[in-house]
Image (spheres, rainbow, N blue to C red):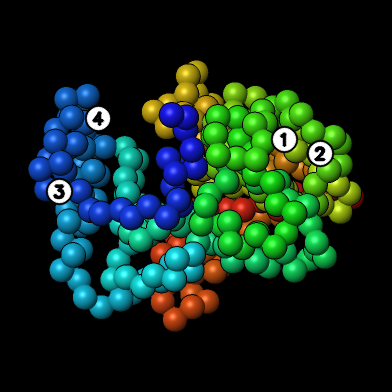
Amino acid sequence: MGITTKNNPAAFQKVSPSRFLKIIKDTVQQVINGQNKAAINIFRAGLLNYFSKFKRKNQFYCNLCKYESPNFLHTSNENRILFNSICPNCSSRKRHRGLNELYKNILTEFNFPKILHFAPEPVFYNLFTSFDYITADLELTDVDLQLDIENIDYQTASFDLILCNHVLEHVSNDDKALKELFRILKPSGTVIITVPGDWMSEKTINYDQPDSNGHYRNYGLNFLIVLDDIFTSVDSIDLYKYDCIYNLSLGLTHQHDLAFLCRKK
């Protein structure tokens, strides 16, 4: 059976905190691997998630599945703990909840846009169902088109809106992919891009080999220069701006998820 969108985050999959024994096993494995900092973060995040079941007052809201919760689940890596990241009801991450508000705003700028969505997340399908909406990926089997983002088999100037959320870090030649996105974008169209990065750092860090998440790089602010060289205009939006538009927090973090709005005249 092939890989589908259900294998990815934001696929309406329920997520539960790890059992205590699994937290211990994961922590020990990181110590064995020599990743002591990662071990500490896994243990701390795991314990916080484990004891969150004792919380009663709702503090967070997921604008994708309309779920209120005392907490979202914390995630971690060797560098940090990302607090209140995963909605336990639909598995959306911070970026998805922020993008949902941005996408709704952008759609008001078009009459009836033709939309291309790379590596689509099922939590967004209802938002786009009334539009000319096409999903694409190189490996996923439950999308409309199998497309290689570095060599897109589609006519020039075909789409009004292109969505590319956490895709480019998985691409060996992201410069080529960006030029392809510009090529298939219609005049007056917009590409919305998000990538994982350290937005306090000036430079992108490139890896000799993809890391454990399949990432070729961790982006820095010089990514804006790359985008400016390809697109007519580029705006960056900190998705944190949408955190408090509901009665409860969306769990967003300041300067964690930036969305780049790339336009073509």
Instruction: Please name the residue that numbered disc 1 is placed on.
Output: 178
At label 1, which amino acid type do we have? Leu
Q: Position of residue 126 (x, y in %)?
A: 58, 62
- Left or right for 20, reference 153: left
Q: Residues within 10 Å of mark 3 (few under 14, many from 20)?
A: few
Relative vertical location of residue 125 with respect to residue 217 in this rendering, above or below: below
Q: Nearer the viewer, mark 1 or mark 3?
A: 3
Dot 3 falls on a residue whose secondary structure is: loop
Precedes in sequence: disc 1 or disc 3? 3
Instruction: Please name the residue that numbered disc 2 is placed on.
Output: 184
Among all residues in the image, which is located at the extreme bottom?
A: 247
Instruction: Please name the residue that numbered disc 3 is placed on.
Output: 19
At label 2, which amino acid type do we have? Ile
Instruction: Please name the residue that numbered disc 4 is placed on.
Output: 35
Q: Are marks 1 and 4 in contact (CB under 8 Å)?
A: no
Foreground of the two, 238 or 108: 108
Q: Residues within 10 Å of mark 2 (few under 14, many from 20)?
A: many
Query: Residue 105's mark?
Result: none
Dot 4 falls on a residue whose secondary structure is: loop
